[in-house]
């Protein structure tokens, strides 16, 4: 993956990059096999660029040395998921070369994050939503936090904030609701978080992606029962 800013990385970030690059090499084989199997199974959700999206899990070191991730609160005027917390990202366009380009383009449009400031280090397994949208999490590193000046898109984003990634492995400020889909029960997780006097709820697909990303980064499972929904087929181990 990209390494434009390798000279700016701390020792911890450099170690993380090396760890995730190894993960990427292993997962690309699995991803290819899964997509091939999916295309051959008529009962599976079709993976296509027309129903494909990507989100950017952009990590950086906080003032205390903890790993943090950028999140947005979507505009209250949007037609879908208005006012919800989300990762920067969106639907793939025909001109996008791949999922990485989709995630970087959307992050630039939504929060003003220039791709030259980040190093993309891995692509995680895709998640599939109930309506058949394939969502691909792209993990990147921002070596120099001070170089990024957030610029939210007025049409799409109300607020940009960040949260500690490890929070999504802890059983604190978390609640869960049992749901059922086609006879299969699963847990919908909600994480309550406060930043600069504002309260946020991080839940559903965004929470699921961050639980998985945190598990990969910290190389340990969450301290709570996860019980993923079956339709998140791409994230199942």
Image: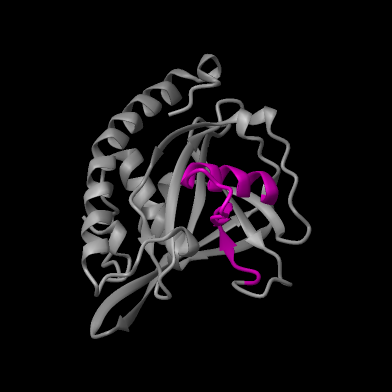
Q: Residue at x 36, y 55 (%)?
A: 126
Q: Quadrant of residue 208?
A: bottom left
**Is residue 95 found inside the magenta-colored segment of the image?**
yes
172 and 185: which one is in front?
185
Query: Is residue 118 shown left or right of residue 220?
Result: right
156 vs 166: above or below = below
Q: Residue at x 48, y 27 (%)?
A: 2
Query: Is residue 150 shown left or right of residue 129?
Result: right
91 and 163: which one is in front?
91
Whether residue 191 is visible, yes or no, is no
Whether residue 192 is visible, yes or no, is yes
114 vs 82: above or below = above
234 and 98: which one is in front?
98
Q: Position of residue 226 (x, y in %)?
A: 28, 63
228 vs 160: above or below = below
Q: Residue at x 34, y 81 (%)?
A: 179
Which residue appears farthest toward the bottom when viewing the image?
183
Q: Quadrant of the C terminus?
A: bottom left
Q: Quadrant of the N terminus?
A: top left
Q: Position of residue 63 (x, y in %)?
A: 58, 31
Q: Position of residue 192 (x, y in %)?
A: 51, 63
Residue range highlighted in magenta = 82-110
């Amino acid at each position: 993956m990209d390494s434009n800013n390798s000279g700016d990385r701390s020792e911890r970030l450099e170690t993380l990059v090396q760890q995730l690059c190894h993960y990427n090499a292993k997962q690309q084989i699995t991803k290819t096999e899964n997509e091939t199997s999916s295309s051959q199974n008529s009962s599976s959700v079709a993976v296509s660029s027309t129903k494909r999206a990507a989100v950017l899990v952009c990590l950086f070191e906080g003032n205390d040395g903890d790993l943090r991730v950028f999140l947005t609160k979507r505009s209250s005027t949007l037609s879908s998921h208005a006012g919800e917390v989300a990762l920067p990202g969106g639907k793939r366009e025909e001109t996008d070369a791949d999922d990485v380009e989709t995630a970087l383009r959307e992050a630039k449009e939504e929060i003003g994050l220039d791709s030259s400031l980040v190093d993309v280090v891995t692509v995680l397994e895709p998640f599939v939503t109930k309506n058949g949208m394939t969502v691909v999490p792209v993990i990147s590193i921002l070596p120099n936090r001070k170089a990024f000046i957030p610029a939210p898109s007025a049409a799409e984003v109300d607020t940009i904030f960040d949260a500690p990634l490890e929070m999504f492995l802890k059983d604190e400020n978390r609640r869960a609701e049992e749901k059922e889909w086609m006879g299969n029960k699963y847990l919908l997780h909600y994480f309550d978080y406060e930043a600069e006097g504002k309260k946020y709820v991080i839940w559903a697909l965004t929470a699921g992606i961050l639980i998985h990303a945190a598990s990969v980064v910290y190389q340990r499972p969450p301290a709570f029962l996860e019980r993923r929904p079956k339709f998140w087929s791409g994230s199942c181990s």
